[in-house]
Image (cartoon, rainbow, N blue to C red):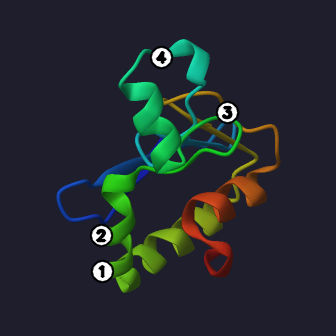
Amino acid sequence: MDQALFPGGYFKEFIFFHKASKTLILTDTIINLELDMIDEPWRTVTKLTGMAHPHGRTFFGMRLPILLHRQKAQAVICKLKSWQPRRVIFSHGRCFDANEDEIVRRIFGKSAW
């Protein structure tokens, strides 16, 4: 396993990479919750923050810090690229049915990948 620490002020994110399977493992970076699996008031909060399946996105607590730490974030993104992941999994919600490039662009922005 390899790892990187993604900057984010109070909310920092450890990103793991399983070399043998070329799998990128994200713990809190992106949330893609299925609304029928959660109760109120979290269902409404999830909808309002855009973190609902099938269009989940970066956890709202990390969005501003990512912008404020742009250079550090870009360095970590370069490291992720060098790993050349084939799969991306994460701990909060359903994984996307897409390739890893699309998922990483969705998480870190179009210009990042």
**Type of the residue with mark 1:** Leu
Task: Give whichever of discs 3 and 4 has the lower sequence position.
Answer: 4
Residue 19 at x, y percent in the picture:
61, 43
Q: Mark 3: which secondary structure? A: loop
Q: Spatial distance from mark 4 to mark 2, Cα to Cα? A: 27 Å
Task: Give whichever of discs 4 and 2 has the lower sequence position.
Answer: 4
Kindly identify which numbered label has been placed on residue 95.
Answer: 3
Among the 4 quarters of the image, the one containing residue 45:
top left
Q: Do the residues bearing badges 1 and 2 touch, measured as CB atoms within 8 Å?
A: yes
94, above or below 103, in the image: above
**Type of the residue with mark 4:** Ile
**Type of the residue with mark 3:** Cys
Q: Spatial distance from mark 1 to mark 4, Cα to Cα? A: 31 Å
Residue bearing mark 1: 68
Task: Give whichever of discs 3 and 1 has the lower sequence position.
Answer: 1
Task: Give whichever of discs 1 and 4 has the lower sequence position.
Answer: 4
**Type of the residue with mark 2:** Pro
Among the 4 quarters of the image, the one containing residue 44:
top left
Does the rendering let one see residue 30?
A: no
Residue 27 at x, y percent in the picture:
43, 38
Q: Mark 2: which secondary structure? A: helix
Does the rendering let one see residue 19?
A: yes
Residue bearing mark 4: 38
Q: Nearer the viewer, residue 34 or 99?
A: 34
